[in-house]
Each structure stands twice: as structure tokens, then as C-alpha cells.
Amino acid sequence: MIEAVVYDFGGVFMESPFEAVHQMSDDKGHDYDVAVELLLGSYEDDTDHPWHRAERGELDVVSTREQISELARARDLDLDLFELFKYVGMDREVYSPMVESVRRARSRGCLTAILTNNIAEARGMWKAMLPTEELFDVVVDSSEVGMRKPDLRIYQHTLDLLGNPEPERTVFLDDYPSNVQAAESIGMIGILVGTDRTRAIALLDDLLAGGST
Ligand SMILES: [Mg+2]
């Protein structure tokens, strides 16, 4: 029986920032792999890349933008973090079937949480996109707690705030594979959310109904 469900935000309730990097790279003629590494760092790790520092609340967004542009200039590239934000903003609709899945989990008596890597300056925006208070018992924002996925401590922190449900009875949904792997490494049930998010929702419904993945 599932006790708790933990959701990522970007790529789960709204478009993935990685999709935005794809669109921007196509428009500007950048190589995606180079652009994503410069803009968002090696996302499978928690590093001292300026974006990671921003997500841990260590660096403000203006300094982050400057440092990323400097990294890009050293590679003879012109990259602007604020330009990327325009692409992320192209689809500000939340994905309502995912919101409904939270309501179903709650109606079955599960606790729910959001666990997002995000920058402090975006907090007001993303929180306003969802009925956050209604949907989640616990909200963990990397920039508030000074830790970010895939650091295992932030998963444990989330479980602590949920009152320590069994990890084996806690589902974690995220669109980034290494974030899902980290959750699984501490015993949680991971669901990778693909571009077709209906599959992830169906897997979760199956688990909530007592099935197994
Ligand atoms: Mg995400």
C-alpha cells in the first residue's frame, strides 16, 4: 500500500527546462549538448556550476546569468540564461491530468509532496501555477533548503517532513533519470515521467490501486 507520493515540478506539471534548451538551441543554431552543459551544468550531478549554486540558493539569478555567460564566452559562445527563461515561459499551462492524479492520490489517503530543484527567484511564479496549498502536505524547494536533487539528503529531508513513510511505500515522479535513480537508491518507488506523461500517471494509478510496477 502506497503511503506517500512525491512529485517533481518542471517536466511533470509543466514543460521541462531541457525541452526549452532544445528549442532555443534549434533557433540559435547551438549544439544542444554544449548549450545544456553550459546553461544548466551536468544535471546528473550536484556540482558548483552556477545554475546548481542558484538552485541551492547560493547565488542570485543575475550573478548566475553573468557567470554562465562567462563560461560560454570561454567557449566562444554567446548564451544568455534570461533568453532561456523566455523559452521556458512559452508554455505556462500546468498539465491538468497530473493535478488530477495528485487529487486521486490524496483521496486514497496518501500524503503528497513536491520536491523541486528551483531558483529562489522562480518560487513565486511556480507556486502560483498550482493550488499548492490544496495539493501538497509538504513542499521542498532546493533553493530554500540549500540542497538539490540528486543529493540523497534532500530526499531524506522530504521523507522526514512527511513523517517518515516507508521509502518502499513512497512513489517519486521526476522527468530526469538520475533524479529517479537517486530516489530508488534509498528505496523509493521511482516513476520516470516521459514526454508522454499519461504513461507515468497510469503507472501511479496502478500502484495506488495496489499493483506493482
Ligand atoms: Mg523536472
Image (tube, rainbow, N blue to C red):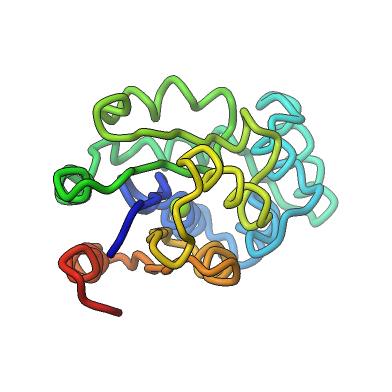
Q: Quadrant of residue 172?
A: bottom left
Q: Position of residue 154 (x, y in %)?
A: 62, 47
User: Could you tell me residue 99's position as x and y percent?
Assistant: 20, 43
Query: What is the quadrant of residue 92 in the picture?
Result: top left
| Residue pictured at 40% horizontal, 50% vertical | 6
Q: Residue at x 38, y 59 (%)?
A: 173
Q: Could you tell me which quadrant the N terminus lies in?
A: bottom left
Pick the residue in front: 185 or 34.
Answer: 185
Q: Is residue 175 left or right of residue 100?
A: right
Residue 200: image quadrant is bottom left
As drawn, the residue found furthest toward the right would be 74
Where is 181 relative to 23, above or below? below
Left/right placement of residue 117 relative to residue 169 reads: right
> Which residue occupies 59% across, 66% down?
186
Where does residue 96 sit, x and y in percent of width and height?
Answer: 16, 44
Does residue 196 appear anywhere in the picture?
no
x and y percentages locating residue 178 in the rendered image: 57, 68
Give the side of residue 68 with respect to residue 180, left or right: right
